[in-house]
Image (spheres, grey):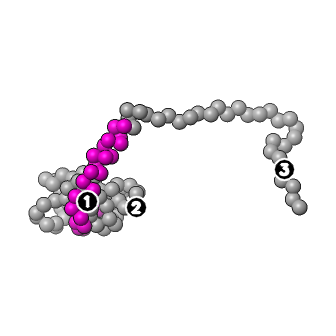
Amino acid sequence: MIGVVLWSDASDRKAVIWCEDQGDLAFLNSAGETLHSGAFFDAGDVVQFDMEVRASMRRAHNPRLVLERAGAELPDALLRGASEESAHPQTAQIIQFCPRERSGGPEFPRVHEA
């Protein structure tokens, strides 16, 4: 799977990844895994990883950097979009349903078969 890192914590070696299949986010907790002891992923990095679902949660394993900071603007864009949504909440248009009284005939026209 390929995804973009939305959030990361280098000290805890954790990250949240937006996956290419647009499904649930994947969580990376590599504190116990053997990874490069150097730099960790930053928000906006494109990574490739193996994924498993455990306890209804997508977990990323064996992450590999594909492209550094390619989606660097993505986390901020998502935050802006979320704040705009909360500033202008949209409500559903509610259409009241009133059942019609039956007049003895069918409510819908019948289709005549040839």
| Residue 68 falls left or right of residue 53 | left
Residue 38 appears in the rendering: yes
Q: Residues within 10 Å of mark 3 (few under 14, many from 20)?
A: few
Task: Report the amino acid beneath label 3.
Answer: Arg
Q: Mark 1 = which residue? A: 70
> Who's the residue at 86% across and 35% down the image?
103
| Residue 111 forms part of the magenta stretch | no
| Residue 66 forms part of the magenta stretch | yes
| Residue 50 falls left or right of residue 40 | right
Kindly state the secondary structure of the residue where label 3 is placed.
loop
Mark 1 and 3 residues: CB-CB less than 8 Å, in contact? no
Is 27 or 69 nearer to us in this picture?
Answer: 69
| Residue 105 falls left or right of residue 39 | right
Q: Distance from label 3 to label 2 (Cα)? A: 44 Å
Residue situated furthest left in the rendering: 38
Q: Quadrant of the N terminus?
A: bottom left
Kindly state the secondary structure of the residue where label 2 is placed.
loop
Please state the extent of the stretch shown in magenta in the rendering. 59-84
Q: Mark 2 = which residue? A: 21
Q: Residues within 10 Å of mark 1 (few under 14, many from 20)?
A: some
Q: Quadrant of the C terminus?
A: bottom right
Q: Mark 3 = which residue? A: 110
- Give the number of the mark in front: 1 or 3: 1
Q: Distance from label 1 to label 2 (Cα)? A: 18 Å
